[in-house]
Amino acid sequence: MRQADIGELGRVIVSLAMAVGLALCTTMAMAQVPELQTRQHLRVCADGNNLPFSNEAGEGFENRIAEMMADELDVPLSYVYAPQVMGFVRNTLDSRMCDVMIGAPAGYEFVQNTIEYYRSVYTLILPKDSDIDATSLNDTSLQGRRIGVIAETPPVTALRRVGADVESYPLQVDTRVRAPVRDAIEDVAEGVTEGAVIWGPLAGYYAARQTPPLTVIPLVDDTSDAQLEYRITMGIRHGEPQWRDWLNDFIARRQSDINAILVDYGVPLVGQDGQLIEMRGASEGDDS
């Protein structure tokens, strides 16, 4: 190896060592911050333009659940809003700008999860007069049909395998600029596509707001190998066991109230047996 190459390798090694050292120092510093024993306010990490979950006007179901939490804590409620894309947790929760994400999938590695507060499932959205008769993504009635789906989500592979003509909408977007799920559902209403396969909470909310409302079929009877059912928790920083315990207790005690909010927004709720336990379209004419 030439001397110049050795020198360059040395610089790379030193740079890597410094980067690793900085990361370790940052992690240790975060771990050494003591957990709050009392809270003067409830600071929520949220997307400011992501209905039906949350928005800056407080119209989402996560906003309403946060209000319940603040009332129980008897503290003011405040938000840190940012587009919920890559880096969201790092820039909000991990930066200690806020203390809880109201919606985080169970097992999401970047946060400490609470117990689940709902389960939901992907749905098939169709016009009311559709001749598609499917309750599973491997149903042959989907073959050759133009079906909208969000890119990189679980239904994509199953739809392609059954021979659907997949219309793809982007997954990672700045919600202040684009709303691909709303676009996908409006395309069904306008006849651009023949149907769409969308995550349940989004499907129930936006399908009910079309004229006429669209049919929403929760895919609880799906026999493809796609993972369509997910458990949703709240997400907090690691190393905050007391805060997690309080949230777990809140969820357990207020589950019926939480369910009532979710049902009001048209969220298809699924039980531990994988079957639908509640389904209702969001209130007609209600934009909350």
Image (cartoon, rainbow, N blue to C red):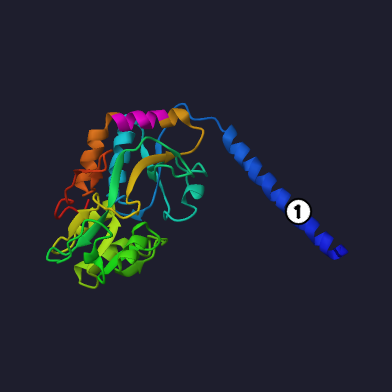
> Could you say which is closer to the camera, residue 90 or residue 81?
90
Task: State how many labels appear.
Answer: 1
Q: What residue lies at 47% left-to-right and 41% top-to-bottom?
A: 111
Instruction: Give the magenta part as a residue range.
Output: 245-252
Q: What residue lies at 44% left-to-right and 45% top-to-bottom?
A: 108
> Could you say which is closer to the camera, residue 134 or residue 56?
134
Q: Position of residue 4 (x, y in %)?
A: 85, 65
Would you say residue 247 sits in the magenta stretch? yes
Horizontal placement of 36 versus 197: left or right?
right
> Could you say which is closer to the camera, residue 6 or residue 39?
6
Report helix, strand or loop for mark 1: helix
Image quadrant of residue 40?
Answer: top left
Q: Position of residue 278 (x, y in %)?
A: 19, 43
Instruction: Give the labeled residue for mark 1.
Output: 13
Would you say residue 94 sits in the magenta stretch? no
Q: Position of residue 1 (x, y in %)?
A: 85, 63
Q: What residue lies at 80% left-to-right and 61% top-to-bottom?
A: 8
Quick check: can you spot residue 186? no
Q: What residue lies at 28% left-to-right and 28% top-to-bottom?
A: 253
Instruction: Please identify the dominant SS of the magenta region.
Output: helix
Image quadrant of residue 119?
Answer: top left
Horizontal placement of 279 versus 21: left or right?
left
> Could you say which is closer to the camera, residue 28 or residue 193?
193
Residue 69, above or below 57: above
Quick check: can you spot residue 214? yes
Q: Amino acid at mark 1?
A: Ile
Q: Position of residue 279 (x, y in %)?
A: 18, 47
Q: Dot 1, crowdedness within 10 Å: few (<14), some or many (≥20)?
A: few
Horizontal placement of 134 versus 96: left or right?
left
